[in-house]
Amino acid sequence: MSITDIRYNLVQAVVKRHDPLGLLAKGRPLEQYDSEITAIMPKIGLAMCVEDLHEYVYFVFANKLFCIKSKNGAEHPMNVVVGRKEDYRQLAEQLFHLREFFYS
């Protein structure tokens, strides 16, 4: 397993614990968060403080576009409630504590 895989798994575990959009609670697969995890990972090592990471984490989740497929295969945007920015604070704090794993 590569260091990138280990980092990804750490971030994925934190995101899973928080389930920020409530997708896992609705039975959706963890892979639903893959694009957000991939977007957030580089910022973890660059964030100078929790507030920086908090801003970015909220931005990433607030700008997620969900689509549902109709029977004919067409994709249609779906509204998702992302919650208040403050709802992402604990997630950002826990991700910020992973910074030591992003400096190697």
Image (cartoon, grey):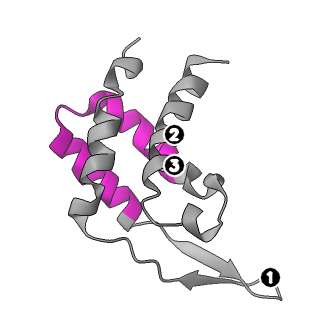
- Kindly identify which residue carries mark 3: 16
Query: Does the magenta portion include 16?
Result: no
Main SS category, magenta section: helix
- Kindly identify which residue carries mark 2: 13
* Residue toward you, 11 or 46: 11
User: How far apart are the alpha carbons under marks 2 and 3?
Assistant: 5 Å
| Image quarter in which the C terminus is found | top left
Type of the residue with mark 3: Lys
* Residue toward you, 22 or 39: 22
Type of the residue with mark 1: Gly
Circles 2 and 3, Cβ within 8 Å, touching? The answer is: yes
Residue range highlighted in magenta: 36-61
Type of the residue with mark 2: Ala
Counting from the top left corner in percent of width and height, residue 48 is at 18, 31
> What is the crowding at mark 2: few (fewer than 14 residues within 10 Å), some, or many (at least 20)?
few
Counting from the top left corner in percent of width and height, residue 89 is at 24, 52
* Residue toward you, 68 or 14: 14
Q: Is residue 60 left or right of residue 93?
A: right
Q: Label 3's element?
A: helix
Query: Does the magenta portion include 49?
Result: yes
Q: Is residue 54 left or right of residue 8?
A: left
Q: Is residue 24 left or right of residue 41?
A: right
- Kindly identify which residue carries mark 1: 73
Counting from the top left corner in percent of width and height, residue 5 is at 60, 27
Pair 1/2: label in front: 2
